[in-house]
Image (spheres, grey):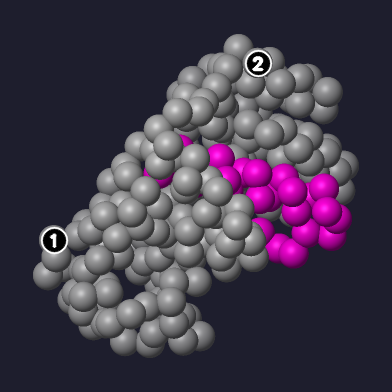
Amino acid sequence: MGRAYQNRKVSMAKTSDAKARVYSKYAREIYVTGKAGGTDPDGNLALRSLIERAKKDQVPTHVIEKAIEKARGGGGEDFAVARYEGFGPGGCMLIVECLTDNANRTIGDVRACFTKTKCKLGTPGSVSHLFDHSAILVFAADNEDAVLEALMAADVDVTDLECEDGSISVFIPHTEHYKARQALQDALGDIDFEVDEVQFIPQTTTTLDAVDQPVLDKLLDLLNYLDDVQNVYCNAVS
């Protein structure tokens, strides 16, 4: 128990530029997900979950619809998932998740962010083995036994389950994300998931001091400014 995770729910952006970047990242992910698995949310659970998250993060409907329409057309860019691993200040570890149509450009941009902050981009597998690739479902409920029973009945491999302050957090392997989601909705009815996503969760955390924290903040700002970067996972705590 007590598994730490970061909620990637995007807070209200303070500037129009920041909002535009958030919208762009969602639009790209919706396009890729729709193109890969179909543009009907009822038949593409990954797309449905992504659209729900985008709406909660106040992405305008026209942005979502345009991305779906683009995916429906079948043309456009061919994006691929690219993940980079590296070491930040104070020995902390990072995983940078990207969607790119030019891997050479993206790795160059990501490497530049690490270089500018005197951090080091690692090789594939250098830190990912110290993270768990897990799906997280968080929703309002207080009957831990009922939730666990529903998941076990659906043969879902639950790696962790927490119940605190009227909220339940379920951790499962990323491969069982939608199986677990459907099992919970079948057993408990329509659930408004506070968190419904796949993340890389660190197995251990690193505490940064007052010197290292600003360096990490700068690195994260540089990475998040890149159009190709979708998510950044880090094991650092301040």
Q: Main secondary structure of the magenta part?
A: helix
Is residue 206 visible in the rendered image? The answer is no
- Residue 63: mark: none
Q: Which residue is mark 2?
A: 105
In the displayed image of the protein, which residue is found farthest to the top? 104
Task: Specify the quadrant that holds the C terminus.
Answer: bottom right
- Residue 155: mark: 1
Residue in the picture at 37% in, 48% down: 39
Where are the magenta residues, as a range?
7-34
Magenta span contains residue 233: no
Identify the secondary structure beneath mark 2: helix
Residue 19 drawn above or below residue 110? below
Q: What's the residue type where badge 1 is placed?
A: Asp
Q: What's the residue type where badge 2 is placed?
A: Arg
Residue in the picture at 68% in, 50% down: 22
Q: Is residue 94 left or right of residue 1?
A: right
Q: Is 84 in front, or is 159?
A: 84
Q: Quadrant of residue 170?
A: bottom left
The percent coordinates of residue 174 (x first, y second) are 34, 48
Q: Is 217 in front, or is 105?
A: 105
- Tell which tag, 2 or 1, sits nearer the viewer: 2
The percent coordinates of residue 137 (x first, y second) are 40, 65
Q: Earlier in the sequence, mark 2 or mark 1?
A: 2
> What is the count of numbered marks?
2
Magenta span contains residue 15: yes
- Please rate how many residues cluster around mark 1, counting C-alpha atoms within 10 Å: few if below 14, some from 14 to 19, many from 20: few
Q: Is residue 108 left or right of residue 49?
A: right
